[in-house]
C-alpha cells in the first residue's frame, strides 16, 4: 500500500462536504476517499516519492518532476495529466514569469507539484479549511482552474490600469519613465503566450469524456474558458494600445529633437553676421577702418548687438522664431 509522502506541502483527504482531514506522513494512502497530495518537486523527498510511487506512469512522473512547462492536457484511462500556469506573486520575481502547476488527477486521487509557491493553491486550501472547498476531485479541478483564472484576471486588470496611467501621461505631453512602456508590453506578450493555450486546454477539458466530471463541472469549465477568452481579448487590446502609445512617444521625441535642432539653427543664424564681421575685421592687414580710433572696439561691439537685434526682429516678423 502506498504511503503519504514526507514533507509534502499539503496532504489532505476531501471529506465530501467542502472540508478536509489531514493525512499524516507515512500513513497508508487509502483510495476509498478523495485525497490531495501537493508536493514541491524541488525537495529530494518529494522527488524520491514521485520516482518510486506505483500510482503514476512514466509520463506523469516526468511531468510532475518539472520536465514540462507549457500548458498541456493528456489523458491516461480515467485519469488526466495537466500542466497549468498561474501568476507569479513571489517576492523578487516578476508576475509574467508564471508558475507551472502540474497535476495528475483521477476519480479518487489528486497529485500536484510545483517549484515556486502559487497563491491559487493556497486559495483552494483555505477554502477547504473554511469548510467551503471542493467536495470531490472533479470539483477540485474546477476550483483550481477558477482560482488560476481569477488571479490572471486581476493581473490583466492591473496592466489595464497601468496603460491608462501611461495614456494620461502622454496626453499631457509628458514622457513616461524610461523602460516603463517596454515592461508593460513584455508582460502583455508573455501572459498572453501562456493564457492562450490554457484557454484551449480548459475548453477541451470540458469536453473530455471523464466519468468523474459532472455536468455542472463541465458548465463551470466552459464559463472559465469564456472568461479566459475575455482576458485574452483584453491582452490583445492592450498590445494594440501600447503600440499606439509607442508611436506617440516616438513622435513626441522626434518633435522635441526637431524643436531643439531648430532652436540651435536659429541661434547659429543670429551669430552668423557677427562671425562674418569679426572674421573680416580680424585680418592682420593695414587699412581697417577705425583701427586708430580709441572708441572703435566699443562702437564695433555695439554695431554687432544692433545687427543681432535687427536679425532677431526680422526672424520674429517672418514667424521663423
Image (spheres, helix red, strand yellow):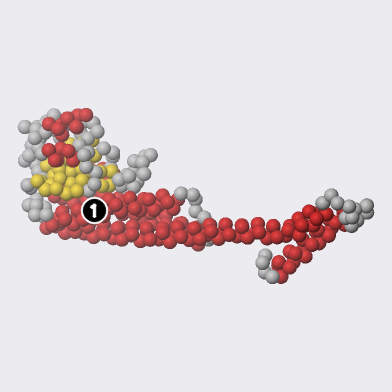
Is 297 situated left or right of 213 in this image? right
Looking at the rendered structure, the secondary structure element under dot 1 is: helix
Residue 145 in the image: state x and y as whole percent.
22, 51
Residue 6 or 299: which is nearer the viewer?
A: 299
Quarter of the view holding residue 58: top left
- The outermost residue toward the right is 293
Q: Measuring 23% from the left and 52% from the top, which residue is drawn there?
A: 198
Which residue is at the front of the view, 42 or 254?
254
Res 15 seen here: no
Q: Residue 75 at what x, y percent from top left?
A: 11, 48
Query: Residue 14 or 263: which is nearer the viewer?
Result: 263
Q: Residue at x 93, y 54 (%)?
A: 293
Q: Residue at x 77, y 57 (%)?
A: 276
Q: Quadrant of the C terminus?
A: bottom right
Q: Which residue is at 14% across, 40% downward?
A: 60
Q: Disc 1 designates what residue?
A: 197
* Residue 218 in sight here: yes
Residue 220 coordinates in the image, percent (x, y): 18, 57
Q: Quadrant of the N terminus?
A: top left
Question: Mark 1 Cα within 10 Å, few/some/many (few <14, many 20+)?
Answer: some
Horizontal arrangement in the rendering, residue 296 relative to residue 165 (left or right):
right
Relative image position of residue 305 (x, y in whole percent): 80, 59
Amino acid at each position: 500500500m502506498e504511503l503519504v509522502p514526507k514533507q509534502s506541502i499539503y496532504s489532505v483527504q476531501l471529506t465530501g462536504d467542502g472540508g478536509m482531514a489531514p493525512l499524516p506522513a507515512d500513513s497508508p494512502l487509502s483510495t476509498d476517499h478523495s485525497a490531495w497530495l501537493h508536493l514541491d518537486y524541488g525537495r529530494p523527498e518529494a522527488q524520491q516519492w514521485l520516482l518510486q510511487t506505483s500510482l503514476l506512469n512514466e509520463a506523469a512522473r516526468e511531468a510532475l518532476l518539472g520536465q514540462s512547462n507549457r500548458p498541456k492536457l493528456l489523458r491516461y484511462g480515467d485519469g488526466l495529466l495537466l500542466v497549468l500556469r498561474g501568476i507569479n506573486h513571489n517576492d523578487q520575481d516578476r508576475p509574467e514569469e508564471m508558475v507551472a502547476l502540474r497535476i495528475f488527477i483521477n476519480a479518487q486521487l489528486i497529485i500536484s507539484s510545483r517549484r515556486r509557491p502559487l497563491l491559487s493553491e493556497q486559495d483552494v486550501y483555505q477554502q477547504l479549511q473554511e469548510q467551503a472547498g471542493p467536495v470531490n476531485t472533479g470539483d477540485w479541478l474546477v476550483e483550481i482552474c477558477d482560482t488560476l483564472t481569477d488571479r490572471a484576471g486581476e493581473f490583466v486588470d492591473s496592466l489595464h490600469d497601468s496603460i491608462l496611467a501611461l495614456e494620461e501621461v502622454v496626453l499631457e505631453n509628458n514622457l513616461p519613465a524610461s523602460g516603463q512602456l517596454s515592461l508593460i508590453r513584455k508582460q502583455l506578450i508573455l501572459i498572453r503566450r501562456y493564457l492562450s493555450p490554457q484557454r484551449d486546454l480548459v475548453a477541451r477539458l470540458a469536453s473530455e469524456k471523464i466519468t468523474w466530471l459532472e455536468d455542472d463541472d463541465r458548465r463551470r469549465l466552459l464559463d472559465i474558458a469564456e472568461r479566459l477568452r475575455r482576458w485574452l481579448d483584453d491582452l490583445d487590446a492592450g498590445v494594440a494600445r501600447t503600440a499606439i502609445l509607442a508611436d506617440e512617444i516616438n513622435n513626441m521625441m522626434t518633435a522635441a529633437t526637431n524643436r531643439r535642432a531648430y532652436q540651435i539653427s536659429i541661434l547659429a543664424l543670429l551669430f552668423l553676421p557677427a562671425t562674418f564681421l569679426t572674421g573680416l575685421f580680424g585680418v592682420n592687414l593695414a587699412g581697417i577702418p577705425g583701427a586708430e580710433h580709441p572708441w572703435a572696439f566699443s562702437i564695433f561691439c555695439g554695431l554687432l548687438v544692433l545687427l543681432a537685434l535687427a536679425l532677431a526682429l526680422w526672424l520674429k516678423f517672418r514667424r521663423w522664431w
